[in-house]
Amino acid sequence: MSRDRSHQPAQAVPGPDPEPQPSEGGARPRSPSAVPPPEVAAPDGAAADATEALPFGRPGRPLGRSPFVFGFTAALGVLTAWLLVQALTATASILVLIVVSLFLAVGLDPAVRWLQRHGLPRWAAIAAVFAAVIAFFSGFGMAVVPALSQQAGQFAEQLPGYVEQLQNNSQVRELDQRFGLLERLQTYLTSGDLGRQVFGGLLGAAGVVVGAVFSTLTVLILTLYFLAALRSITTTGYRLVPRSRRARVRLLGDEILNRVGGYVGGNLIISAIAGVTTFFFLWVMGVPYALALAIIVAVTDLIPLVGAGIGAAVATLAALSVSVPVAVGTLVFFVVYQQIENYLIAPKVMRSSVDVPATATIVAALVGGALLGIVGALLAIPVAAAVQLIVTEVALPRQERH
């Protein structure tokens, strides 16, 4: 059935453009060829918006290949790197204190969590742990400082007797006759050089003591703050990781914190056992200042590799003031105890905290000691444990997939 096409509109047939009509003023409009170019035409619509966005014209091509721009950018990069190195060098001591405080906070956090599991709120658990730390430092000062001051006083009182013993020695008298040693010593003692050197030495020692006290107080205060804010610090750190990797990073980070805390707690237990055992041995042998020496042994035992040797040397020298056989017996005691600690005590205590191969432990302690001294040696083993965990759980599986 055909449709009626009479009602459909007729399509317009293209034809010539109509002639422009004159305006009211009688002037004919200009043809399109007479329209000025866009640069000088009056802006309207998009052109007006572009002009408002770029009031001083369209910018030219960037000077990216200019040697002047390249050299200036490189110079700014070198200057920024140099300023950053200078800032790190100037604040190195403060950064070390911050790292030590954070390390101690992570190490004390397992004790806080243990107290929380036994019914204490977190603030009370932190207060109890921190009170124990303050008590330890106070006991250390009360045991060591009086012993050192008393020993220094006794040495000053016995100094004339030591000089007299030197004068009665035949070899010393022979050397004095040949080189005039005692006369030179007397001249030096009566001159003012000794007083100036002693005064300068006292000032230097006082400065070292003040610096040590300030560093200790700073570490204690920062440790308290880090221990109270440890959860928020770790949560903020995990939020900096992309969401797709946050769960895995959280698991790895929590495991690293647990290993560091286990290492610190285990090391404190081993040092406490060493201190208690040393105290009872020295007390039985009649060595003076047994408590102070035991605390020194416990503190130095925290240092990997060389700490036990330092504590043993100090205790043996103190035992030498009693008699040579007592000193020899003290030395034998420390040799035997170190074997027991290395092969029986330490493996059982550290079994569930840090599992680092012996070679990696030695290398990490040597590198850490060379970089940061005693602090580096203390931090080296937990850092090695963290690196080992990352390599085992991240690097090696990634290599197996390729």
Image: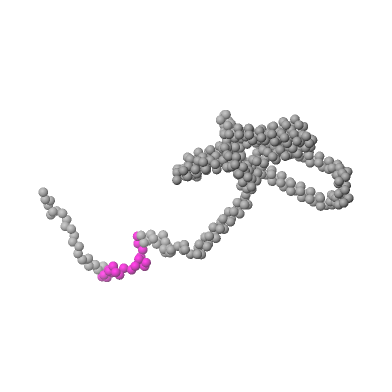
Q: Is residue 387 left or right of residue 138?
A: left
Residue bounds of the magenta highlight: 25-45
Residue 382 sits above or below residue 14 on the image: above
Residue displayed at 65% across by 39% down: 302
Q: Looking at the rendering, in which quadrant would you find the C terminus?
A: top left
Question: Between 71 and 381, which is closer to the camera in this rendering?
Answer: 381
Looking at the image, residue 27 sits to the left or right of residue 66; the answer is left
Quick one: which residue is furthest to the left in this view? 1
Nearer-the-camera pick, 89 or 185 = 185
Q: Position of residue 297 (x, y in %)?
A: 70, 37
- Residue shown at 48% from the left, 42% from the top: 397
Q: Is residue 255 found inside the magenta-colored segment of the image?
A: no
Q: Is residue 271 above or below residue 38?
A: above
Magenta-span inclusion, residue 28: yes
Q: How many marks?
A: 0
Q: Residue furthest top?
A: 118
Q: Tell me the chief SS of the magenta region.
A: loop
> Observer-nearest residue: 138 or 22?
138
In terms of image quadrants, where is residue 212? top right
Residue 326, given in percent of the width and then of the height, sits at: 77, 34
Residue at x 41% of width, y 59% of height: 53
Compare residues 287 and 214 and report the one nearer the observer.
287
Residue 167 placement: quadrant: top right
Residue 20 placement, left or right of 112: left
Instruction: Answer whether residue 270 is visible to the viewer in this image.
Output: no
Relative placement, left or right, of 208 versus 175 is left
* Spot occupied by residue 183 in the image (x, y as percentages of width and height): 87, 50
